[in-house]
Amino acid sequence: MSNKIRLIVFLALYTTISVAQSVTPTKKADVFFNEPEIAHKVDSLLSIMTIDEKIGQTVLFTSGWDVTGPTVRDNVMEEIRSGRCGNIFNRHTVAATTKLQEIAVNETRLGIPLLFGYDVIHGHRTIFPISLGESASWDLEAIEEGARVAAREASASGLHWTFAPMVDISRDPRWGRISESAGEDPYLGSLIGAARVRGFQGDNLKDVTTVMACVKHFAAYGASQAGRDYHTVDMSERVLRETYLPPYKAALDAGAASVMTSFNEIDGVPASASTHLYTDILRKEWGFNGFVVTDYLAVNELIPHGVAKDKYQAAKLSINAGIDMDMEGGAFMENLKKLIENGEVTEEKLDEAAGYILAMKFRLGLFEDPFRYSNTKREKKEILSKENKEAAYQMAKKSFVLLKNDNQVLPLKKNQKIAVIGQLANSKRDMLGSWKATGSPKEAGTILKAITKKNGKKNTTFAKGYTFKPLDFDHYDNSGFEQAIKNAKDADVILLVAGEHWSWTGEATSRTNIHLPQIQKDLFQELAKLDKPMVVLMMNGRPIAIGDEVDASDAMLEIWYPGTEGGRAVADVIFGEYNPSGKLPATFPRNVGQIPIYHSMKNTGRPYTPGVSKGKYHSKYLFTKNTPLFQFGFGLSYTTFEYSDIKVSSNKVSANDNVTVSVTVKNTGDYDGAEVVQLYLQDVIGSVTRPVRELKGFKKTFIKKGKSATVEFTLSKDDLSFFRQDMSWGTEPGDFNVFVGGDSDAELKVSFELE
Ligand code: GLC
């Protein structure tokens, strides 16, 4: 019997068994899912699978098209053909995925289709700003749209699954993966994570223009000690639950289909072996019914972590903790059968793991048609479509954060002589940042090209000024200074593009300092001596310590890595066709010594208030201010906004009532613009110490020049709740302060008492 016919017969068998069983639901059906029809199909399929075939479903191998970790094998065809590997990542395009799917469907006994996954983090082929940049837009609709575009392109390329959103709260700029995050704040990070899941998955996983999301990296990967990637994470259960878990929960509440483990240990237990995280919290407490995949080789890494002596023990720890799929390491493939034979892992546990994965393949419709994502016509139409590039362009503009604009140097007038300086100004590759998926530098427009197009060749010069040697931070070659300074002298305005080489951000790129390379620092100073208007564009994947450079500049715009359409987005903002509206999603420290520094810190018993506190015995530094270079939520505009008339619905609030806060915001400048109106809450006294303030609301509001808007927020009981001293979640009576403004230093305040 040919494989295709066998599969058709087989599917008929599923249905028969399912219908039959629908009369008498099996125990597993109740345990697995709240979708009896899917559960019965899974039960039926499991009931005729061999142990080897079930193990095959728990195996994920890279196809090697992209390198996202250490390479441990080079040929997956045999594993697919033998049914030992049921899932593939790092392979895309319809042609390439179809080839592998045909092997799985036609050459294995049961023809169970493969899942295809890939790191589509901020775009698939049309690349959006890096995630930290997208987050700086504080525009949830635009962020969701970005994920939607990525899903359309990824699914058109034969992919079913993206390893995103990364929702790790990141408060340490030394950690290169802060670039992939939504920054420091659980409230903002939760809303962004949920928006990305909605964008990726839509409201029906069977829709072939959607892909499964994968919430990562569970959990608390961003708290790696000293910002060193893969390093130890150790924190109280309170901090874990109050700060680090909320974005994962929000993404799962938005329906995320899968979860990826983190490399780190927490409280002594590596995540990929953590029963507390994966069984107690994820399954039992949160009722998650998707599947869990480890990060790259993370099962094998239980050995160097020191909790497993070999892959046999590592596989046992991991699957028994509640992990369903082993990425790349082969530990499940090589050991689960023996573990079951030895009674160290039950077949029920294997059924559960394989079952969650098979359920997802059913939900995607892959058993009905394993090739439903393989449509070359759609691939050709979708990739880099005009609509997708427009969405990337719009997001890029919204992601930029105006950090300084003395004397309204920006926006620039056209036909001025502009000296564009800096290797990054003319680099296509750097525009895409890290985790660029299938984004191609040749499709990215540079900043230089876009500025020249708007300003004219005769009025625009270029000089590299500095150069990078990617893996040599101290590379120092100032031979480009002379030309840069000459161009600057001949110009009306200097447009300097500075920052980090794209390869200094993303995975395994931790740094022990967060300042610019000396060569760039010196160039800033040389150009500042010319006393010419100097506008700086910063391209970086982390908050960086640029105090001296800010002082040397007249205007500074944070543009992150702005993506395929970032060049024209920069030009439009520089020349005033779009008024920058971004706000920082992470605090910018003055220097690395201040880390960790974020807006929702505690007051301590010896707080320091500049100009007020007397004497030495305060929580402060000898030679540096406590305040950051730029605070969380900060971002200027070409216009100005004035806040007034803050009101609260009642000064005494009962425990179950909502609280409404309203404020008037007036555009008092010369440009229409959008302002992210932010609300911060302070619970003054608690049974445990409470942050000096926490973000509990924001509204991005467009206000025409000269006009005003009344912005209203509603605070629920949940917004006032926290993990009290006994770790119960809830409120406590007492005083609350509410601050509303354009960043986390908001001063306009109103208070109420919770009874
Ligand atoms: C990498 C990353 C993870 C990514 C995975 C697959 O090591 O940690 O974020 O999704 O491997 O490429």
Image (spheres, rainbow, N blue to C red):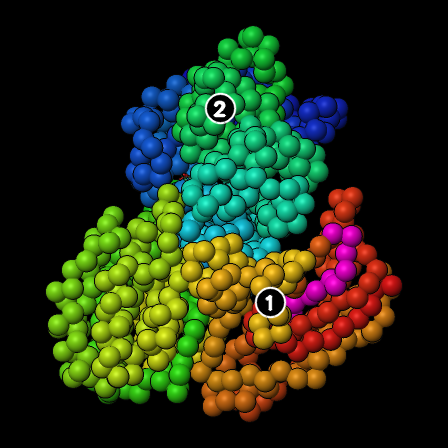
- The picture places residue 504, in percent across and down from the top left corner, at 32, 51
Can residue 60 be seen?
Answer: no
Residue at 35 percent across and 70 percent down: it is: 548
- Looking at the rendered image, the disc whose residue lies closer to the viewer, 2 or 1, is 1
Q: Is residue 565 magenta?
A: no
**Which of 212/17 is in front?**
212
Mark 2 lies on a secondary structure that is loop
Give the numbered dot on residue 413.
Answer: none
Q: Secondary structure at mark 1?
A: loop
Q: Are marks 2 and 1 in contact (CB under 8 Å)?
A: no
Q: Which residue is found at the position 76% from the left and 49% from the top?
A: 724
At 31% across and 87% down in the image, what residue appears?
A: 413
Count neighbours of disc 2 (C-alpha within 10 A) and say few if under 14, some if 14 to 19, many if 20 or more: few
View extreme (front): residue: 615
Which stretch is magenta?
Answer: 677-688
Q: Is residue 361 left or right of residue 431?
A: right
Can you tell which mark lies on residue 306?
Answer: 2
Foreground residue among 177 and 610: 610
| 106 relative position to 349: left or right | left
Ligand 1 position by quadrant: top left
Q: State whether residue 520 is above or below residue 105.
A: below
**Residue indicated by mark 1:** 615
The magenta stretch spans residue 678: yes
Amino acid at the residue labelled 2: Gly
Residue at 57% in and 39% down: 234
- What is the quadrant of the C terminus in the image? bottom right
* Kind of residue indicated by mark 1: Gly
**In the picture, residue 88 is in which quadrant?**
top left
